Image (cartoon, rainbow, N blue to C red):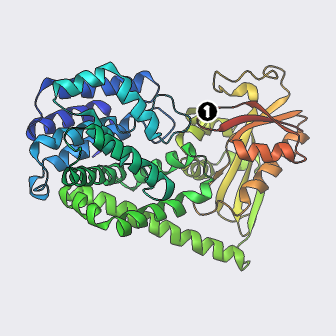
Amino acid sequence: MQLYANSQNLRDEIISLLISCGLEKPCYTIMLDYIINLFESQGLGKEYYGYHNITHELEVTYVSTIILNWKSILNDIRPDDFKYLYAAALFHDFDPQKSVDKPHEDSVIRFLTHDGNVKQFCQDADMDLNIITALILRTTYPWSAKLKENAEKQILECFNESPITKNNPQMQEYFMKFGWLLSVIDRVSGYALGDFGKAMDMAKKNAHALAWHPSLIVKRSVAYFEDLLNNESEMCEVVLRALPKYMRKNFMDAVTGFLNLRQQEIKIQSDCLYENLRLVPKIESMRIRDDTEFVKTLIEIYNELPTPLQFDREHFAKTMKDPKTILNTLRLSSSDGPIIGFAKGGPIENYLLRPEIMDENHGKHNTVFLEPIALKMGYWGLRGGSEMRHLFTMQAHSMNYKYLTSFALRDVIQRRVLSNEKAEFVTKFDPERWDYYRIEL
């Protein structure tokens, strides 16, 4: 069901479920609309580059309200406290001053405690903001080591400030378990609300936002699910049992999908290690670039890139036929083998880049732009990308370009600055740390 990709549909579903679980006061709907407007006004709508956007916030809230309607598993939770799970889910990731995509709980708490509207919502719903804060702090991930220790100290301060939990160990334990429930919902919801394509898109967005190398996407996704299913199995089972059957299936399909991809990656890496596999970069002729099946193959690989890295999507096929477009591919085993990746680019004047970029060479026709390297999942980290980039640079040099520009992770560019590549930062972007740089050819 793709209704969950639409914020308006998610909003309507949440309101319907709120009424079903006894949260029918107008303040709950007003609260919902307020947070939607906040996210969108801060550039954190569904077009936001990272994982923690308004869609994620509403998905967690939606799944929370589904679980609140599953009364049989909530026998130890008082109906009057349902509002706390709802409010904490709704506000748990709002970090307007992002330094990185992953919300900083301290920033979220700072916003909650200083926003007059939030205080009014709490008053209208007869809620203690200290309890909401404690639940949000319990969503800290990973819940271990220093992060856990710091969060527990802050949670204890909240409990000591609240008349509901002050000097009451039983109520403190009760709300800690409630916070654990929210933490697991936070980590399950997005994967339960779509097919494996959505799960992979989430993983890629998260990797891009956290500046991970693409070779880590599947490996860290597998570790994420193993931690959830093994170390938090008790609460994970509670959450999954409360979800409709198709949502449970979506979640388990995501788990098995990433496990299968990891097995494929290991097999590919094993073949490379024992030299059963060769990666061969190749400059492609204009004749092959006019072939429909060739272009279709490249588009399939292109579609595996995170959305922010897909440049000029609408004109992809058309640019293949432009003689000014530089293209090389990476093939398996031989120059005629299956295509597993490509490097593509052209004159910087052919691209509409981010408005923050003021490239002094734009219009001088002396600069080539290299689009993000595209590789099939499983082949990252085997140096195929580097081989294609070097071949692209040679092609650009032969066409008398003076400069090459592109985007890359900040630490990658920094290494190139310190190497013999004569790289320089042109424009840095935060919180992405996916920066625009230039190399003199």
Q: Is residue 392 above or below residue 262?
A: above
Identify the residue shown where x is 76% and y is 35%. 437
Residue 168 appears left or right of 339: left
Residue to which mark 1 is pinned? 430
The one of 132 and 351 positioned closer to us in this rendering = 132
Residue 53 appears left or right of 22: right
Residue 59 visible from this viewpoint: no
Identify the residue shown where x is 42% and y is 56%. 143
The one of 317 and 165 positioned closer to us in this rendering = 165
x, y percentage for residue 417? Answer: 83, 42
Identify the residue shown where x is 73% and y is 37%. 406
The image quarter containing residue 383 is bottom right
Q: Amino acid at mark 1?
A: Asp
x, y percentage for residue 270? Answer: 64, 76
Quadrant holding the C terminus: top right
x, y percentage for residue 435? Answer: 69, 36
Q: Is residue 252 above or below residue 82?
A: below
Residue 259 visible from this viewpoint: yes
Q: Residues within 10 Å of mark 1 (few under 14, many from 20)?
A: few
The one of 215 and 335 positioned closer to us in this rendering = 215
The one of 429 and 265 positioned closer to us in this rendering = 429
Q: Secondary structure at mark 1?
A: loop
Q: Is residue 299 above or below residue 126?
A: below
Identify the residue shown where x is 35% and y is 45%. 155
The image quarter containing residue 344 is top right
x, y percentage for residue 170? Answer: 19, 54
Q: Is residue 360 above or below residue 344?
A: above
Q: Pick out the residue farthest to the front.
A: 167
